[in-house]
Amino acid sequence: MKKVLAIILAVAMIASIAVLSGCSGNSGTASTAGSADDGKTSGDAGTPDSKDTGKTYIIYSDNAFAPFEYLDTETGKYVGVDMDIMEAVAADQGFSYEMHNEGFDPAMGAVQARQADGMIAGMTITDERKETFDFSAPYFEDGQVIVAKEGTTLEDLKGKTVAAKTSTVGGEYAESIKDEYGFTINYYEGSDNMYQAVLAGTDVACVEDFSVIGYAIKSGKVALSIISDKPANVKGYGFAVKKGENAELLKMFDAGLKNITDNGKLKEILAKYGY
């Protein structure tokens, strides 16, 4: 009887080991990014050959810099050139991300504080910024212009205040020409705040990226005019990460950007917004 019981227990143990061995295999799936929704974007299941590392990257952006990022009031979602580029690059490279549209200055702060893995916000690549950020290849070029109410001239800036956006190349450009034109500067957190200050007469003019204010004027959202001759200080926009960190994310962005440039997707995105 003892021998029979021992044989039964041995058979049961072998069967249990076989079952456990069958359950220990890996069958995971990779993730790719989806489309933006209420300011945050996260990925869905993708293909097995995806380059996904299993991490969901936190990406920050501006919240009022049309047409690069702005709130679509009809859908309640953030849309724009940067939103579309980020989505296309993530889909091409097969990684997941979550988008936070918090404002330009907060976005830079989040990357520096390691609260965000990267940012895409119409961010001009400059030597000064390269001291604290690593940038992708440029995906767009733009420069700064001076904008005011219809009929205002550059001579009218003397003795007045001009609006500029905090922590931007536009602000740096305003600082570089303020003595030449004899104005002082008022700083604002967002582009919309600058436009309203000029329209209300608080400031005589503002300094803004040409493509951004051009889009606002063309779409009828802002009743202002460009009073400078041509865009100055023309440089490229780039995706940015904290210097020395997130090299893998930056590498994937560059690879994806090249692919969507080569296959015409980037051109399609820019054309969608009039470029």
Image: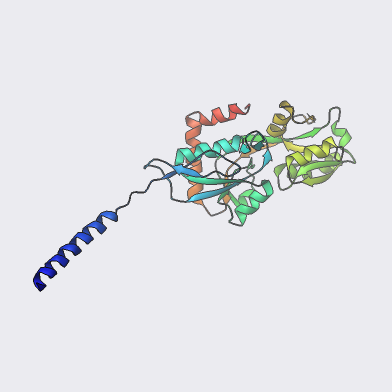
Q: Nearer the viewer, residue 93 or 33?
A: 33
- Asked if residue 128 can be seen in this view, the reply is no
Question: What residue is at 56 percent from the left and 30 percent from the top?
Answer: 269
Q: Report x, y in % for residue 11.
A: 15, 63
Q: Quadrant of residue 180?
A: top right
Q: Relative to 229, is 7 above or below?
A: below
Would residue 170 appear left or right of 271 to someone viewing this image? right
Identify the residue at horizontal 45%, vertical 41% (top origin): 93
Q: Please give left or right for residue 205 compared with residue 144 in the image.
A: right
Tell me if residue 172 comes above or below residue 217 in the rendering. below
The outermost residue toward the bottom is 2
Where in the figure is residue 248, as x and y percent of width and height? 47, 49
Q: Which sits in the foreground, 253 or 181?
A: 253
Vertical order, 95 against 16 (above or below): above
Q: Residue at x 72, y 31 (%)?
A: 216
Task: Specify the quadrant of the image occupied by residue 144.
Answer: top right
Q: Quadrant of the C terminus?
A: top right
Query: Measured from the top left, where is residue 84 in percent x and y?
Result: 56, 35
